Image (spheres, rainbow, N blue to C red):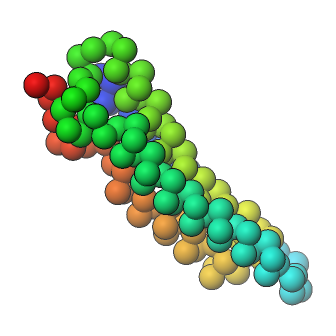
Amino acid sequence: MKPVQLTVFIIWGALCASLLVYAGMLNAMTFAPGKADTSSLGNIIALAAGSGAALSLVLRKLLLGGFATGKLSLDDPTHRGRFVAGNVVVFALSEGIGALGFVNGVSSSGRIEAWLPYLALAFVLMLLHIPLPSRFKPAS
C-alpha cells in the first residue's frame, strides 16, 4: 500500500467512525415526550439522501475511474492529488447521508426509524467505496 493510499484509508476510517458517533449520540440523547410534525422535513432529507447516494456513485466513476482502469497512476504526483480529492468527495457525500440521518433523528425526537435507515445506507456506501489497493490497477 502506497502512502497516499494509506492516507485515504485513514480518512475513510475516520468518516466511518463518525457514523458510529452519530448513532451513539442519538442513543444517548434524552428527548422530551411529544409528537413533532416532521413529515415535510423528513421528505426533504430523504430526497437529499437519495440524491447524495446516487451522486457518490456517479462521481466515483468520474473522478476515480481512471485509477480503476489503470489510465491514471499514483506514481505521478499530479494524479495523487486527484486520487485524494476524488476519494474525499465520494466519502463526504456518503457520510453526509449519515449526517442527514442525525438531523432527521434529532428533529423526530430520536425515533430509531427516523435515523437508522440513513446511517445504515451511509455505512453501506462507505463499505462500497472502501479504498482497497486491489481496486486500483497499476498504470500500464
Viewer-closest of 72 and 111: 72
Residue 22 in view in this figure: no
Q: Quadrant of residue 64?
A: top left
* Most distant residue in the left direction: 140
Q: Is residue 15 left or right of residue 106?
A: left
Q: Quadrant of residue 57?
A: bottom left
Q: Is residue 5 above or below residue 53?
A: above
Q: Is residue 24 above or below residue 117?
A: above
Q: Is residue 15 left or right of residue 48?
A: left
Where's residue 128, x and y in %?
35, 57
Name the residue: 23% across, 23% down: 73
Q: Is residue 36 left or right of residue 99?
A: right
Q: Quadrant of residue 1?
A: top left
Where's residue 12, x and y in %?
43, 43
Name the residue: 26% across, 34% down: 67
How many tags in the picture?
A: 0
Q: Quadrant of the C terminus?
A: top left
Name the residue: 32% across, 30% down: 6
Name the residue: 27% across, 14% down: 76
Q: Is residue 48 above or below residue 126?
A: below
Residue 76 in view in this figure: yes
Where's residue 31, x and y in %?
82, 75
Q: Is residue 93 above or below residue 125?
A: above
Viewer-closest of 131 and 50: 50
Where's residue 9, x and y in %?
36, 37
* Most distant residue in the top direction: 77
